[in-house]
Amino acid sequence: METCLKNKFEHLSNLYFPEDGEGYLEARQCAVQLSRFPAAVVYVEDVEEVKDAMACAVDNGYKVSPRGGNHSYQGLGTMDGYIVIDMGRTCKPEDFVIDKDDQGPHILEGSKYIGTMKAQAGCTNAVMLAMGHKNFQEEGGLTLIGSCPSVGITGYVLGGGSGDVSPYVGYAADIVKEFQIVLYDGTVVKASENENTDLYWASRGGGGGNGIITHLTYKIVEAPKQKMEEEEGKKFTVLNLALSLKPDSFEKAAARIQEWFYDADPLITGKFGGTNRWISNAFSPVLTSSLFTGTYVYLGSWREAIEDLQTTGLLDEDLFDIMSDFDNPPPLDPDVFYQVDATLVENYEVLCDESASPCVQFQDTPGAIVGPAGTPAIQTAVQFDTYGEAEAFQICSAQLFRDATIGSFSWSYTSGDFCKDLGIGDDKCEDKPLPLPFKGSIRVPKSCIDKDVIDAMLVAA
């Protein structure tokens, strides 16, 4: 097997075997699981090299383990005794195939996809977001990605794949139009609704194992029509919502939230996608009632979001108070709420910061205020002109640069100086110490409400 691979691959730096010491130890590592011991790790760069590696494995009686973004918590892309075929080096955005003539109806009534992107299997969520932004921002195109930017798209799709815009566009299994796959005998096939349909069906959320995927074709879905689109263009808003369920109306309030998810008009609620959480007062000495909180990427302006929340019954003063009406409000949950020192932002302009309480713009918007203290149920709203910027901000503020934690490293590959990696000016950056037991510091942007930072993320992806 080893001789076969060395004969097939000119660049031996693409091959690692157990006797290769540190190189092999690094090549066998996974996102979390570190104890896998493959027979070999092969870094391929194109379809022909995939076929060569597969042939060496089959001819010598080895099983293969395709590896995309290497984010499997169980280490399933790096199996013991297998030949790992790592697809990471196949990602070449300059070779993406963009087809704006391939269009058609999508899942929700009136929705449609406005084009496709054919990408290599080694690409990541971040690359797909950046390329979707580059090629479809003017059309309001939505590129579905998961919350972690460095997760590989192949494992993401094979696992079903959900993201912030899933309520409108569906799962990754719904937006992948075609796979290109190398089978065990080296045959290259395509799988779609019209070709090798069983293989297509099995690969859309089935977990893989039917061959090595080399390319995926994504549908790019058009954002829904917005009320002020003709005058102002499309808008996309990242917002935080916090509602307290009134104790004397708890059952009705809880039912209203369930109805909002399951029974309200999906053309409205489908515009809200993100993370929700219940915080029970049974587990908090601070709370007198339970909280419903969430962070959403909303497909529209913040004003339209308030109107939609009203229309679907989620801003009902008879059922809900808001968190900031408490004498001692609990801290925002960092796993749900993004960290930003502003209440209202439009296209990087801060209209209200934390010192402005209540925010005049919220006060002047019908339906925005809930509760006797005159504070908004929408805790913060950050509005952008493009979906790519909104999603990049969500990544930036929700986890990537929020705290100097090891999460910053697992979410994205970095030298430890994100600003240098992204090409951001030093004046926009700061050092944050790593928490114990880690030593040293990490350099990150001071703020995510900065067009230079967001643009750099979308370019560097």
Image (spheres, rainbow, N blue to C red):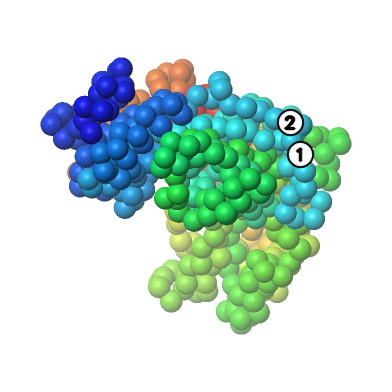
User: Of residues 44 and 7, which is closer to you in this image?
Assistant: 7
Q: Amino acid at mark 2?
A: Lys
Does residue 143 appear left or right of residue 63 in this picture? right
Mark 2 surroundings: few (<14), some (14-19) or many (≥20) residues within 10 A = some
- Residue at image location 30% in from the left, 34% down from the top: 56
Q: Secondary structure at mark 2?
A: loop
Instruction: Tell me if residue 157 comes above or below residue 125 in the rendering.
Output: below
Does residue 277 appear left or right of residue 344 in this picture? left
Residue 190 spot, x, y in % from top left: 57, 40
Please name the residue that numbered disc 1 is placed on: 103
Residue 159 spot, x, y in % from top left: 48, 53
Quadrant of res 372: bottom right
User: Of residues 279 and 79, which is closer to you in this image?
Assistant: 79
Which label sits on residue 21?
A: none
Does residue 52 appear left or right of residue 374 in this picture? left
- Residue at image location 70% in from the left, 42% down from the top: 221
- Asked whether the viewer can see residue 252, the reply is yes
- Residue at image location 47% in from the left, 72% down from the top: 280
Instruction: Tell me if residue 110 comes above or below residue 430 in the rendering.
Output: below
- The Cα atoms of the two marked residues, 2 and 1, are separated by 7 Å
Please name the residue that numbered disc 2 is placed on: 100
Residue 381 spot, x, y in % from top left: 63, 45
Q: Amino acid at mark 1?
A: Gln
